[in-house]
Image (spheres, rainbow, N blue to C red):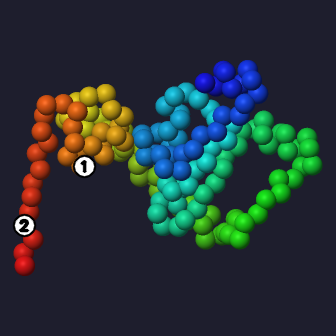
Amino acid sequence: MREICDRHGILVIADEVMCGMGRTGSLHAIEQEGIAPDLMAIAKGLGGGYQPVGAVLVAEKIVDAFRRGSGMFQHGHTYIGHPMAAAAALAVQRVIRRDGLIDQVKARGAYFERRWGGSRTSATSAAAACSGASNSSKTPRRSVRSIPR
């Protein structure tokens, strides 16, 4: 994909709003494909659910194009560069690194693969296991607790 886009002058854009920031076992899901996008949208995991925040990561060649042009990227929205959102995003990224959360996602994915088999990705396996689904003949065991009235 990368080669074809480069050959034809097409930018590769990755939308990692839902799947990025460690949810698939790597910081960015597209890393697992060995592709470096020109632009990448990130959001939900960036603020860890504590603060709505989104961002677009851009490749150096995109930044260089702006530098060679006017040198400005004119844009703006009401809450752009909001200090609270930026602080929350930074804190979440520090926790991801400090607590080794990406390694934990990988470990849980490997556990679900061993437990329920199949060739699913870590995130898919985890979701399937949580819902009780399986792509093998094994039936996941579930414990049901009654809630006292």
Determine whether, in the image, residue 25 is placed left or right of residue 17: left
In the image, what residue type sits under mark 1?
Cys
Write the residue at 29% across / 35% down: 110
Category of crowding for the residue at label 1, using alpha-carbon neighbours closer than 10 angstroms: few (below 14), some (14–19), many (at least 20): few
Determine whether, in the image, residue 7 is placed left or right of residue 23: right
Q: Nearer the viewer, residue 128 or 34?
A: 128
**On screen, residue 17 above or below 148:** above
- Most extreme residue toward the bottom, as rendered? 149
Q: Is residue 92 visible?
A: no
The residue indicated by pointer 1 is 130
Residue 72 pos. (x, y %): 87, 53
Q: Is residue 32 visible?
A: yes
The residue indicated by pointer 2 is 146
Q: Secondary structure at mark 2?
A: loop
Write the residue at 48% across / 50% down: 18
In the image, what residue type sits under mark 2?
Ser
Residue 4 pos. (x, y %): 67, 21
Q: How many numbered marks are there?
A: 2
Q: Nearer the viewer, residue 146 or 102?
A: 146
Residue 36 pos. (x, y %): 62, 32
Of mark 1 and mark 2, the one earlier in the sequence is 1
Determine whether, in the image, residue 44 is placed left or right of residue 71: left
- Quarter of the image with the C terminus is bottom left
Q: Nearer the viewer, residue 36 or 78?
A: 78
Q: Secondary structure at mark 1?
A: helix
Where on the picture, by quarter, is residue 135?
top left
Determine whether, in the image, residue 123 is placed left or right of residue 72: left
